[in-house]
Image: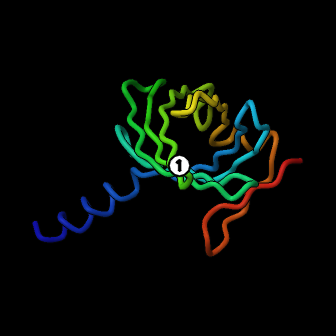
Amino acid sequence: MKKLIPLAALALAACSTTAPVVGQFTSTKDEFMGQATASWTAGTMSIQSQAGITCTGALRRDSTVNGNGDLICSDGRTGTFVFTKSNEYGGSGFGTLSNGEKFRFLWGNTVGRRARCDQDPDGIACTRI
């Protein structure tokens, strides 16, 4: 019975997935990149724009296809977003910051179609192709 506990903990840890995120703030055209890590129902998202603004927040999946989240940015703005899965491992989303600025993003393997992402010591770094 004692061997089942470590195996169960390992199985639960494997349920979390990290995916690249790339997007753009629509009015300033400031592009951002980062990553989202999620389990079946909740997770986190962290992005950094070309202008150096960082935003972090929580995300929630309300179904197997859709979810939403909140962001807090280093410049004091906050925001909300929604996202959807367009295939098994990726999708898209959009949101609005507290100053009215809108943003759009791609996540997961949907990013791979438009960018190359590599893991480095600071997280996931993406470049557009």
Q: Residue at x 67, y 71 (%)?
A: 120
Q: Residue at x 23, y 68 (%)?
A: 6
Q: How many numbered circles are shown?
A: 1
Residue 37 percent location from the top left of the image: 48, 51
Q: Is residue 10 above or below residue 30?
A: below
Q: Residue at x 54, y 55 (%)?
A: 74
Q: Amino acid at mark 1?
A: Ala
Q: Front-most of 106 and 15?
A: 106
Compared across the picture, whether 129 is left or right of 90 comes to: right
Furthest-left residue in this view? 1
Q: Is residue 73 above or below residue 62?
A: below
Residue 73 percent location from the top left of the image: 52, 50
Picture colour scheme = rainbow
Judging by the rendered image, the residue that carries numbered circle 1 is 36
Q: Is residue 28 above or below residue 2?
A: above
Residue 114 percent location from the top left of the image: 82, 41
**SS of the residue under disc 1:** strand
Q: Residues within 10 Å of mark 1 (few under 14, many from 20)?
A: many
Could you tell me which quadrant the N terminus lies in? bottom left
Residue 129 percent location from the top left of the image: 89, 47
Furthest-right residue in this view? 129
Compared across the picture, whether 41 is left or right of 17 comes to: left
Q: Front-most of 41 and 3?
A: 41
Compared across the picture, whether 80 is left or right of 63 comes to: right
Q: Residue at x 64, y 50 (%)?
A: 20
